[in-house]
Amino acid sequence: MSGSGFDNFNTDFYQSSYSVDDQGQPAGYGYSNTEDPYKQGQYGQYDYSQSVGYAAPGMMQPQTPYTGQIYQPTPAFTPSPAQSMYSSSFDDEPPLLEELGINFDHIWQKTLTVLHPMKAADGNIMNETDLAGPMVFCLAFGATLLLTGKIQFGYVYGISAIGCLGMYCLLNLMSMTGVSFGCVASVLGYCLLPMILLASFGVLFSLQGMLGIIIAATIIGWCSFSASKIFISALAMDGQQLLVAYPCALLYGVFALISVF
């Protein structure tokens, strides 16, 4: 009874179309075509019967060389002229004296203009701010006074500064174009050169006499005439040379008093 119940349970649990008599035949498993798909020449729409050719390693075809143009990118950054100047060699740089504003040619031309009072002055050169020559002449004038036993370096530089300031104010009031303080100091310093000759005469003989007074007056006129000539040529002050020469004579007269006494 129990056995028949188990058979009924199996038959009721799952109804299958499988039969014991079909064991000798291959099961279709739902395929409508009973032929073996692996016996066909194609699988997955690909023909495996085709032969695949492989070339021997020694018989490979040589590759053709690339004949195109190599890409060269253009630089995205262009150096500025200042960077190009600094990246160049040191041969392109100006001399050190030129960077400092020291031009020996102009210094020599200004010196010749002072030593030759009748020579016409070049206004373009005289309008430059050159203090190298005046500093040398002031130092030479103080050193010449030192040879006579007079230590007057402080008076020389002090009177020079006060005189340059006074002439700067006066020339700006008299001229239409105006003038810089450096130009005034440069001209007055170069015109101090004849005063060095007066101090040199004081080393050889005493200037406290009639001869000394004549030489001192001549040197004062020389210095003032040269300075006024340069000022009127640089500032285009035609017809005003005597007006400019008078204050210059007062300034150089103080230097003459230091040299004589």
Image: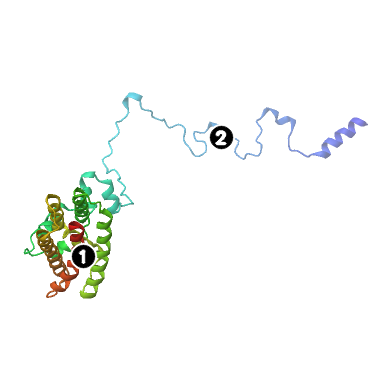
SS at mark 1? helix
Q: Picture quarter containing residue 172? A: bottom left
Instruction: Give me the residue at 74% from left, 30% from top.
Output: 20
The image's mark for residue 37 is: 2
Looking at the rendered structure, which numbered label has been put on residue 84? none
Of 169 and 96, nearer the camera is 169
Point 15% across, 52% down: residue: 104
Marks 1/2 in contact by CB < 8 Å: the verdict is: no
Q: Position of residue 36 (x, y in %)?
A: 58, 33
Which residue carries the number 1 mark?
A: 251
Query: Quadrant of residue 248 in the image?
Result: bottom left
Q: Position of residue 167 (x, y in %)?
A: 23, 68
Q: Is residue 176 above or below residue 136?
A: below
Q: Secondary structure at mark 2?
A: helix
Q: Badge 1: few (under 14), some or many (20 or more) residues near its Cα, within 10 Å?
A: many
> Label 2 amino acid?
Pro
- Residue 24, compared with residue 122, is above or below; it is above
Q: Is residue 118 left or right of residue 28?
A: left
**How many numbered discs?**
2
Which corner quadrant holds the N terminus?
Answer: top right
Image position of 112 (left or right of 27): left
Going by the numbered disc 1, the residue's amino acid type is Leu
Q: Is residue 128 visible?
A: no
